[in-house]
Image (cartoon, helix red, strand yellow):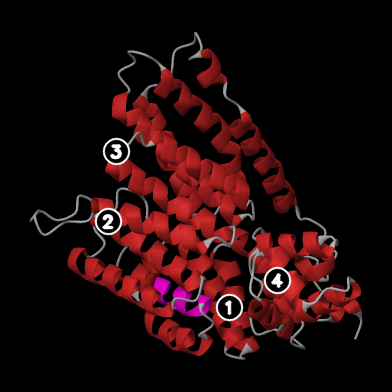
Amino acid sequence: MTTNELPIGRRIARLRTRRRMTQQMLADRLGKSKSWVDKVERGVRALDRYTVIQDLAEVLRVDPVALLGRDALPSQAARAAAHGVDGVRAALDRYDTALTGPQVQAAPPVGELGRRVRHAWLTYQHADYPQLLRMLPGLLGDIQHTHACPGGGAGDGAAELLVQAYRITSSVLVKLGEGDLGWLAADRAMSASTGDPLRVAAAAVPLGQALRALGRPRPALAVTIAAAHRIAPTVRRADPPRDPALHGTLLVQAALAAAGFGDERSARELVDQAARIADETGGDHDRHGTSFGPTAVELARVAAAVEVGAGGEAVVLHERVVGTDHWRRLPAEHRAAYLLDVTRAYLQAGDPLAAGRALVDADRTAPAEVRLRPVARTLIADLTRHGPVPADVARLAADLGIG
């Protein structure tokens, strides 16, 4: 077996040995435990976050491609996405409005900006990430201009739209493996929330996602729990939460964060709390684009099980939830992202054929989720190393230059 054919864990072990590093030394430099390194090297724990692969590559002094064992040529869509990320980065680098104030030209009206934000949400939900990345720089600049205009009458409307625009920006950046940039956009969303509890809660959703993508699940748990508690009903207040879908979404994000550092009990309890809210509300009144509802909560239950390594349990849960009308009504982005979690579950459960089927289903549902996300490429590379794969998986791997 050549080096490129080795599983990623064995490749890491070989490179670590060449660098004359013990597992403990590697763990210390990564800020992980020795047990984590051992599980990665033995293939017990999957490396499905590109940011972690980048950290490993930096410590081992190699290119991330050397760890993935591939020489993939970027597709046209991948090149477009990379160019789009550069454009968003440039937009986030600009401080024109803060430094010089709003420009002389008239600011776009809030109504027009609201329509553009809604279009951006739909583009995200349809997983058209290259198109979304082309839209975002101009959208962010125009909303910032309107938000900064004195006496423009924009008020809270522009602030709400700015938070939403930063949320969309953060979410797509995290998906594309740009965790640090996604964190910056989420932090901007928090700053733009100006202390309003619901806007802060909405901004905390992508902030938690970005922190988890950066391998910081404990801070992600802290921020999402704090935001959820801030908008939750209290014993002294008989009225329901002002936005139950947002409240439930924060609990789901907190559950995934808890699962991220192995706190299975807390993850289960938080998902159960979210499930009770979903059952009471039916997922209605979702004005923050969370897709929250009973089905979304059950998908999160599967994702949390995968995160703690309980692939067998995740598979059982998965097979109960798909195929319903509620599942089909979820946005394509949500369903395809979930199917990547299911791919991991089947791999953990030792069923690469079912994992391949889930991956192909994800590609059919929203191709950009598979063809542009680093996590999907890692899963495809892992599948191809399990031996012969079905023709559709092999075709997908060939399309992406993975082998």
Structural distance between the alpha carbons of marks 3 and 1: 39 Å
The image's mark for residue 27 is 4
Q: Is residue 316 magenta?
A: no
Q: Secondary structure at mark 4?
A: helix
Segment tinted magenta in the rendering = 299-307
Q: Is residue 166 above or below residue 279?
A: above
Name which residue type carries label 1. Thr
Residue 3 in percent (x, y) is at 89, 78
Which residue sits at x=30%, y=56%?
Answer: 228
Which of the marked residues, 4 or 2, is nearer the chain's N terminus?
4
Q: Which mark is residue 193?
A: none
Viewer-side residue, 399 vs 224: 224
- Disc sitting over residue 229 in the figure: 2
Which circle, 2 or 1, is nearer the viewer? Answer: 2
Mark with earlier residue (3, 4): 4
Question: Does residue 300 appear left or right of residue 230 in this picture?
Answer: right
Instruction: State whether residue 332 appears in this view.
Output: no
What amino acid type should be assigned to the residue bearing mark 2?
Answer: His
Mark nearer the viewer, 3 or 4 = 4
Which element type, helix, strand or loop, lies under badge 2?
helix
Badge 4 crowding class, 10 Å Cα cut-off, few under 14, some 14 to 19, many 20 or more, is: some
**What residue type is disc 3 on?**
Asp
Residue positioned 42% across, 41% down in the render: 190
Residue at image position (20%, 63%) is: 281
Compared across the picture, whether 341 is left or right of 377 comes to left
> Which residue in the structure is indicated by mark 1?
343
Could you say where residue 136 lies in the image, as x and y percent from the top left? 55, 37
Q: Nearer the viewer, mark 4 or mark 2?
A: 4
- x then y, percent, for residue 111: 34, 28
Q: Which mark is residue 196?
A: 3
Q: Are marks 2 and 3 in contact (CB under 8 Å)?
A: no
Q: Quadrant of the N terminus?
A: bottom right
